[in-house]
Image (spheres, coloured by chain):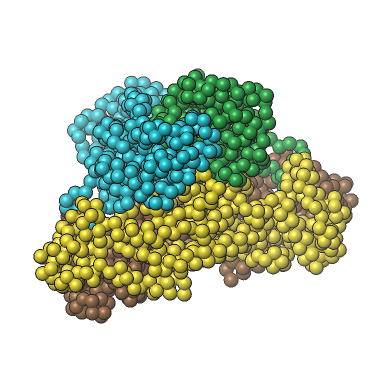
Chain colours: A cyan, B green, C yellow, D brown
Amino acid sequence: MVPRYARPAMTAIWEPEMKYAIWFEIEAHATDKLGELGVVPASAGKALWDWWKTNPKIDVEAIDAIEAVTKHDVIAFLTWVAENVGDEARFMHQGMTSSDVLDTTLAVQLDRAAAILLEDLDKLLAAIRTRAEEHKYTPTIGRSHGIHAEPVTFGLKMAEAYAEFSRCKERLEFARKEIATCAISGAVGTFANIDPSVEEYVAEKMGLAVEPVSTQVIPRDRHAMFFAVLGVIASSIERLAVEVRHLQRTEVLEAEEYFSPGQKGSSAMPHKRNPILTENLTGLARVVRGATVPAMENVALWHERDISHSSVERFIGPDATITLDFALTRLTGVIEKLLVYPERMQKNLDRMGGLVHSQRVLLALTQAGVSREDAYRLVQRNAMKVWESDGALSLLELLKADDEVTAALSEEQIEEKFDLDYHFKNVDTIFARVFG
Amino acid sequence: MVPRYARPAMTAIWEPEMKYAIWFEIEAHATDKLGELGVVPASAGKALWDWWKTNPKIDVEAIDAIEAVTKHDVIAFLTWVAENVGDEARFMHQGMTSSDVLDTTLAVQLDRAAAILLEDLDKLLAAIRTRAEEHKYTPTIGRSHGIHAEPVTFGLKMAEAYAEFSRCKERLEFARKEIATCAISGAVGTFANIDPSVEEYVAEKMGLAVEPVSTQVIPRDRHAMFFAVLGVIASSIERLAVEVRHLQRTEVLEAEEYFSPGQKGSSAMPHKRNPILTENLTGLARVVRGATVPAMENVALWHERDISHSSVERFIGPDATITLDFALTRLTGVIEKLLVYPERMQKNLDRMGGLVHSQRVLLALTQAGVSREDAYRLVQRNAMKVWESDGALSLLELLKADDEVTAALSEEQIEEKFDLDYHFKNVDTIFARVFG
Amino acid sequence: MVPRYARPAMTAIWEPEMKYAIWFEIEAHATDKLGELGVVPASAGKALWDWWKTNPKIDVEAIDAIEAVTKHDVIAFLTWVAENVGDEARFMHQGMTSSDVLDTTLAVQLDRAAAILLEDLDKLLAAIRTRAEEHKYTPTIGRSHGIHAEPVTFGLKMAEAYAEFSRCKERLEFARKEIATCAISGAVGTFANIDPSVEEYVAEKMGLAVEPVSTQVIPRDRHAMFFAVLGVIASSIERLAVEVRHLQRTEVLEAEEYFSPGQKGSSAMPHKRNPILTENLTGLARVVRGATVPAMENVALWHERDISHSSVERFIGPDATITLDFALTRLTGVIEKLLVYPERMQKNLDRMGGLVHSQRVLLALTQAGVSREDAYRLVQRNAMKVWESDGALSLLELLKADDEVTAALSEEQIEEKFDLDYHFKNVDTIFARVFG
Amino acid sequence: MVPRYARPAMTAIWEPEMKYAIWFEIEAHATDKLGELGVVPASAGKALWDWWKTNPKIDVEAIDAIEAVTKHDVIAFLTWVAENVGDEARFMHQGMTSSDVLDTTLAVQLDRAAAILLEDLDKLLAAIRTRAEEHKYTPTIGRSHGIHAEPVTFGLKMAEAYAEFSRCKERLEFARKEIATCAISGAVGTFANIDPSVEEYVAEKMGLAVEPVSTQVIPRDRHAMFFAVLGVIASSIERLAVEVRHLQRTEVLEAEEYFSPGQKGSSAMPHKRNPILTENLTGLARVVRGATVPAMENVALWHERDISHSSVERFIGPDATITLDFALTRLTGVIEKLLVYPERMQKNLDRMGGLVHSQRVLLALTQAGVSREDAYRLVQRNAMKVWESDGALSLLELLKADDEVTAALSEEQIEEKFDLDYHFKNVDTIFARVFG
């Protein structure tokens, strides 16, 4: 976790205090159920919750000190709770194994992290939608291979992003369900020393599903899927970030990240306004994506479990969720405040002398009976002149002066092919598909 | 694609003949709809299909030769079709762009690949289930950290695998839906020169959903998700493969890959039976997983598209699907024919002198009123003796001879803790959860 | 391996015929030495080489047919050789294990692949150097964050690429040495049944170093390093490819990939000239990089060896080397034939109204005694006006009209700061560092 | 960075205080040289160093507060220094750009990190060597595919590790040289406003080489190579860690991680001694390896630079170096204190009834004139009986009772093939190769 790329709500999920609070809840709920089953005295759970209601400060340092001796984190925690609650605490953890607590806690943490990320996505989607509607019909050049192709609208670019992040949301909802399971099944998952109903009870209390079959641990294919989805979302962030970076290039300048008055772009070149937020997002995407393969490598644990996954998760659990939360929020801000320059878009659109309309002319010629090959040749020879003039010549004028072209199409017909609105007649249809 | 790790049905999807056949179908369906809309003569589509009904051989070399000149694959194909169909073929591809064909074709290929992989998963699940039921109550030692823990059954190991691959199936079904979309939206996705109804028509005919908004291409986050899911499935294959490899170790030998009479394990050591299939699967998992990050790097195409994704997909499209198909099938064979040795499992279970029952004794002591710390100490001091004797001493006997233990538990009570069936009382519950 | 991204010389290294030829050489050299040591008859090696001198066709299908029965590739090969050479062939492979042959062969293949890649790098370096010298003083705008910064020369851009690929060459030479080792040490690397002098002899004959200690296999950290270096080289290819793609953008157009007359850029937009070669290189870089992590995952083989690495290497061995060879060669072609447009570079340089000189003015003001903060403010307020005029206003004129500026600097002093050559005074120094 | 996997010396390199201290040194050295060149007053550098000699506390919070306003880290730092040093400080940073400071600082940090890692490797190598010599002739079974193969010694296993980490050291030395360069070349690397001699001076003072050609930044292929080497080293750590984990398996138990008296292996199973350190190392290897691809993705910066690499480096710079330092040190401790059990090694060696000697018998039969195929058949049929008896039968006895075998070999000859020392005759040769 790098503090400058972290937001408090997500960070809190990964603090030791939160972890221990979840541990406590799991243990206390389990003790309640064990009490109900008659395995431990019913008073045990009550004692735990009575203490909990006093809103006790979780003394992380004290627990750490015990762990330094026992070299076992859960035992250290149980010992510390026992020191505080007293004798009744000895009934805690009956028939359970450390991983029951650890893995269910990780499930709660990832579930809560997913909840925040889903909110982030909602905010991002709302921001994108606002800009999409605002610029639904703002003409801009569509580019393939970085080369001018045909007109699109800036709203369409936003609609694409909206559709993409809507899919990201579905993926995250899918992955969240995968990750949100509770396992309280004992040392090797057989429920030898604990009844399956305890697992069911705790699962319900903690808002989780029951893990149908665990070993000592919750199977790590679930986590691999979760982090892979975060990697895909990060890649979509990168796509939109790269789009903004391209639009802000000096020669393009169709949009810019918001530039606050106090901000200095460069210590040396005071005129510079750099797309540093989206460049930053491009880098953060690499970081989140970097968790994917380690998470997949975590799947093949030995037999009923080994603990190799644990150190990996100590890094990628916080890093990937905190960084993605930050990145989504930063991207939302970028989109909300993005300075959009329609005049410059129009200027860029016009700079190729009308070449972007060549495809329509090509079709018109074909439909007027010219062979595909001839039509291509006719358009290309005029297009090349425009191209070589760097936009000084106009394709429209050249075509109107080309006898072979005018033999097939009237001047009026040619002019009609240069109409911008022609390209936008289905924008509404697309918006309806995307925004419903 | 490495031929020895490839099966014909999956390989066929990626052959040029199949690709061109799909190209043709897309173009011909589009021409039909364009005819219906009056954009091209209705006879155009008919001419295409009439030719197609003659079951013409697709002349890959001829198309390649044209591409060598035009340096454009779709134009080469259209030219070749026109040479065969005649004049009516000139109406093909009206208002479409190459990517409409290429991307929709890739969607069809991945959709069909997914169909095969889903069948593979069904077969694997069936094989696992059979072995799970066969060995539902075959006792074997559960291991954490590679160290003996408590008893499980071999059926439970299989049930875990079943649950894991069931999740893999759900993931693949999810990812398949993502990938199975049709885009026929023209040069920059605006439908400027082609009506959206053509896309809808072709989508239906090809068994795909409509891509709500495309640029020139289908957005690559869909493909990233797809390949990420293949990577997760590969990781689950690795997990089961590693399990078999462990079971087959000389010192463990609880199961073995089937060993055919003609097979030589080693040119030098004739007695060796090596788990080469599951070692191979471990490697193949790395290969499939290797497609994940490149697929994610493909997402951030520039503006409405660049073609950097294409070369990546020429590798990972065939490689990941063909390899995964092969791996799933190989794994199915391994499981179906796996030689399982229950006697050896029992022997291994017994070799620790009953240490695996220590947890039960620990609990019993606690329940009999001994403090957690004391109970731990009592069990541990006896356990350590057994441990140091390498299983020559028996924990049961030592406990019965320990005064502090017998002060809390009767001999009968102690003996009862060493009953194997105790551990299996919830196997049926778990099976019900997993197999329904 | 994807045929369209493959060149014959590199592909040949990975053909079965080549593999078997190397196998034969290793076995025959080993037999020679074993003969010298008196372990086998001296006639055995001679018989092998006598047959080999007849330049026998290696019958891959026949060997495959034998392998189908024995399920062991080396035994299949030895059997086939024995069928051809006769009785003397039985002395082959004495005391050796399959991996002795397989791993040493892989070393030879990777060593030869490295030789080709080093030649590729030499050609690329030569191409870059030629363009660097040609454009040593061609002014072009330097950009940070995609935003105009200060002037550089196109030659400098090439010099950077030259320095980068020179480093790549050193890395590959380093990695080549790592990979080029010979192991003939028997079943577990103890030389129990074969004298170390055989290894030394074969190593020398095959142009390899001796592997100081092998297990059954050559340790895979060597290969991991090799493929990691290929991944780094691929990343450098990506960098230069991305530079070209940027330069070719419609709005920038400072350079273009060579565009042959017969080539059609798009089926729909005849005017388009797309940077498809460098986009392709961007994708190929992802593919080569994709081999890095699987190669690293191959390192941790179990005990003296498992065979999980083998399937991975069957993919990445050919794929990474063939693709990188193709990519380096393609990049060399792109650079050699790159269309460079100095006029457009100058035009772009001028389009910001002189803002690129702001840093020099800032420094001049500071040196004239203005505080850093004031100097910044003075330059920034004029720069902002130019910026907002989209280059219509000139920074030089505005500064000359700014009283606070002229209070510190004379008109002449200001003008001198807008001299382009000022920026290039150290180009020669840099070239001397890079090209020696 | 995860505190529990971090050591202070390495962590200190990445603390803000250290970063700012390096910034100061670079700026002050540059100011000295600029003073010598007459660009700034000679008193400027002196003023800076005079202040520095007072050992001023670097006030990170104050600098952060300034950055919150300026949104530029280097300007914030310069402002803070100016507040402390006074008027002379305004000559700092003359003609430099932020990246001159930032990138050279990163070079210093990585260079120092590499120095620590090289020390770590030396300690690890020493620990491995000690155990290698201690167990030079301790017999243990060599395993391929997890299956008993032929005898090796535990010392040989250590020698392999020694050779591997020696290679790692060479790689790191190579990568360290790559990373240790100084760039002070101004906004786009042209030295327009600063003389190259400043770069040379600072490089020498900071113990770095001169970067031959920089843009605004030091090229990132250097860093990619560095992190790739860390990834390879991590993979070698994983290999040795996996070896220990295998040796500690209950059924194998040839070695164990040191188990301190106070340590509790499991809250439930007091007899358990788990290889948690090496499992942890397996996970940490995944983490370090996870930096490789993001570092490679950082190479293709746009034009003279973009800042996408920066956020990635804020994670992987500290994480990969700190984690690797921790992992190397932990591994050194594991090896130093590893409990090695020669008796168990011998017991395991013997448990296959002599099958491990089958290769020698096979060779002897061949050398006695039996055809390869017949020899194989003879050995195999006896070996299979031993195999099926689970080591109860002895291969030696069976062979002596096989008429076809005794027809070729005398009883004495057969017995001689079961001599363990035979396998170790070249151990000394191998040790001489590895340890010199």
In the displayed structure, D3 sits above or below B215; it is below
Image coords of residue C264 (percent x, y): 52, 44
Image coords of residue D279 (percent x, y): 47, 47
In the displayed structure, D127 sits above or below A227; it is below
Image coords of residue D320 (percent x, y): 40, 55
Residue D394 placement, left or right of C315: right
In the displayed structure, A19 sits above or below B37; it is below
In the displayed structure, B426 sits above or below A147; it is above
Residue situated in front as seen by the camera: A409 or D279: A409
Residue situated in front as seen by the camera: A236 or D123: A236
Residue name at image x 54 percent, y 34 percent: A371
Residue situated in front as seen by the camera: D342 or A155: A155
Image coords of residue B153 (percent x, y): 55, 29
Residue name at image x 15 percent, y 62 percent: C378
Residue B130 placement, left or right of C280: right
Quadrant in the rendering for residue D164: bottom right
